[in-house]
Amino acid sequence: MAYVIAIMVGIVFGAGDQYLGTLAAGSVLGTWSWTVSGMSAPWLILPFVAGMSQDRPRRAMRLGLVITLSALAGYFAMTYSPMESIPLRDFPSGVFHMVTSMPNPLWIVAGIISGPLFGWLGHRWRVARSWVAATLITVALCFEPLARLARGTLPDPAVWAVEIAIGLAVGLAFVLVARRTPAAQPAA
């Protein structure tokens, strides 16, 4: 059942992320929606949270991979869907072209690596209150805007300020949870 939920959540996440970015193109919501859609940190948090739900490390890694690949599938499928004014007959060839055109193969490889890794880190947070896991999630949120600024790709600074604030709140939440809640015991 966890895999079915992961597939459904992943598809909805990926499709929603892609659609949010499309809304900016039509000026429906402005640049903030495109900026949010372009964030990388949520794509790491997704498998982390999936991994937090698991007692066993291998299952957490598999679930992290499944939810990440499902999110990518949802993203690619939404790109060539009727909701994006693409005729259904163009769906197979459009998705194939998108999946095989650069830089998307790099994103797929990154998902194949980061999905299991962050699933495992979520598991480590659950069973051991791993500070490495907590730090990596906090850093992903707090420092992504700075990396974007260094590259000159910071389109909406207000969104990035919110991401940093969320990162600081998440970091504080990790500290508070670690102080008040013991780690779950791993399954035998």
Image: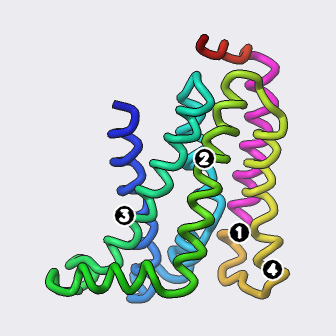
Residue at disc 2, secondary structure: helix
Which of the marked residues, 2 or 4, is nearer the chain's N terminus?
2
Q: Which mark is residue 116?
A: 2
The numbered mark, 3 or 4, whose residue comes first in the sequence reads 3
Question: What is the spatial separation of the Cα atoms under label 2 and label 3, in whole angstroms?
Answer: 18 Å
Pick the front one: 62 or 27: 62
> Percent x, y for residue 70?
41, 56
User: Which is closer to the viewer, label 2 or label 1?
Assistant: 2
| Residue bounds of the magenta highlight | 161-180
Q: Nearer the viewer, mark 1 or mark 3?
A: 3
Percent across and percent down for residue 179 are 82, 20
The Cα–Cα distance between marks 2 and 4, rounded to whole angstroms, is 28 Å
At label 3, which amino acid type do we have? Answer: Gly
Q: Is residue 67 or residue 84 the one in the foreground? A: 67
Q: Where's residue 132, x and y in %?
A: 83, 40
Please name the residue that numbered disc 1 is placed on.
160
Q: Disc 4 on helix, strand or loop?
A: helix
Q: Is residue 111 in the magenta section?
A: no
Between the residue at mark 3 and the residue at mark 4, the CA separation in whole angstroms equals: 28 Å
Label 2 Cα crowd, 10 Å radius (few <14 / some 14-19 / many 20+): many
Amino acid type at image mark 1:
Trp
Looking at the rendered structure, the secondary structure element under dot 1 is: helix
Q: Residue at x 39, y 82 (%)?
A: 28
- Please give the name of the residue rendered at 69% of the width and 61% of the height, measured from the top-left corner: 162
Mark 4 = which residue? Answer: 149
Left-right relation of 175 to 32: right
Q: Mark 3 — residue? A: 74
